[in-house]
Image: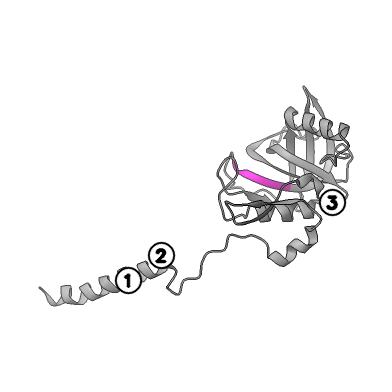
């Protein structure tokens, strides 16, 4: 065996031991955060319904429509769906869009979006559409499908709290969970320039 080989062998053993310790959580490397909000912040939304989740060993919020503000909805969603953990029906990490849409955001990403309603109207066939202005000034088109709107109508008839209260009123805050479709949206004031488009799975409007 050469002298260089003798020097390399202990280094390889040390490296393998270090990797093993990290995998077992025994090394100096801190565990990665899932990005969920601190438990103390949940006191703000203690009024919202929650239920035990054996899979996650903690309670999860089960009725987003109970949120009094979009901030409360976002807090509940971040607890249920931390940004650093894949999950949901698509088994993806959810991207929280609070100020603009990143250029590198991939099509079909699952997102949370919040903005102020500039326009809201029916697009026909039971579909609702909005133009939203985000905090950085970005304008986004959001479209909600018919099946959610039908559930909203049924909830209203049953006297339950609804997610969409005044969805066509400019100036109200809109927040929703959906799927990013790319730069495919339409702004009626600037039809020549496509804008970001989000297909909404769940949304609400509130005063704040």
Q: Nearer the viewer, residue 155 or 193?
A: 155
Instruction: State the separation of the CA atoms marked 3 and 2.
Output: 42 Å
Identify which residue is drawn at 78% across, 32% down: 151
Q: Is residue 14 visible?
A: yes
Quarter of image, res 72: bottom right
Q: Which mark is residue 68?
A: 3
Q: Residues within 10 Å of mark 3 (few under 14, many from 20)?
A: some
The residue indicated by pointer 2 is 23
Q: Nearer the viewer, residue 186 or 4?
A: 4
Q: Position of residue 10 (x, y in %)?
A: 23, 75
The residue indicated by pointer 1 is 17
Q: Position of residue 57 (x, y in %)?
A: 60, 57
Over which residues does the magenta segment extend? 109-113
Q: Is residue 128 visible?
A: no
| Disc nearer the start of the sequence (2/1) | 1
Identify which residue is drawn at 44% across, 69% down: 25
Is the Cβ of the residue at disc 3 closer than 8 Å to that at disc 2?
no
Q: Residues within 10 Å of mark 1 (few under 14, many from 20)?
A: few
Q: Is residue 25 left or right of residue 78?
A: left
Identify which residue is drawn at 87% across, 46% down: 172
Local SS, label 3? loop
Q: Is residue 169 left or right of residue 41?
A: right
Instruction: State the separation of the CA atoms marked 2 and 1.
Output: 10 Å
Q: Which mark is residue 152?
A: none
Local SS, label 1? helix
| Disc nearer the start of the sequence (1/3) | 1
Is residue 145 highlighted in magenta? no
Q: Is residue 2 left or right of residue 85?
A: left
Q: Position of residue 197 (x, y in %)?
A: 69, 37
């Amino acid at each position: 065996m050469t002298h260089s080989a003798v020097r390399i062998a202990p280094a390889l053993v040390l490296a393998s031991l270090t990797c093993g310790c990290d995998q077992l959580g025994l090394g100096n490397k801190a565990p990665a955060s899932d990005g969920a909000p601190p438990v103390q912040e949940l006191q703000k939304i203690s009024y919202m319904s929650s239920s035990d989740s054996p899979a996650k060993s903690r309670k999860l919020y089960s009725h987003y429509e109970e949120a009094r503000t979009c901030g409360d909805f976002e807090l509940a969603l971040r607890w249920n769906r931390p940004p650093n953990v894949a999950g949901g029906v698509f088994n993806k990490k959810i991207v929280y869009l609070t100020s603009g849409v990143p250029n590198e955001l991939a099509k079909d990403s699952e997102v949370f979006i919040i903005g102020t309603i500039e326009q809201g109207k029916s697009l026909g066939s039971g579909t609702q559409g909005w133009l939203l202005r985000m905090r950085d000034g970005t304008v986004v088109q959001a479209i909600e499908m018919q099946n959610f709107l039908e559930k909203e109508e049924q909830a209203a008839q049953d006297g339950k709290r609804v997610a969409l209260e005044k969805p066509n009123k400019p100036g109200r805050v809109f927040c929703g969970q959906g799927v990013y479709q790319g730069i495919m949206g339409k702004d009626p004031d600037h039809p020549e320039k496509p804008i970001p488009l989000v297909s909404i799975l769940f949304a609400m409007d509130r005063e704040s």
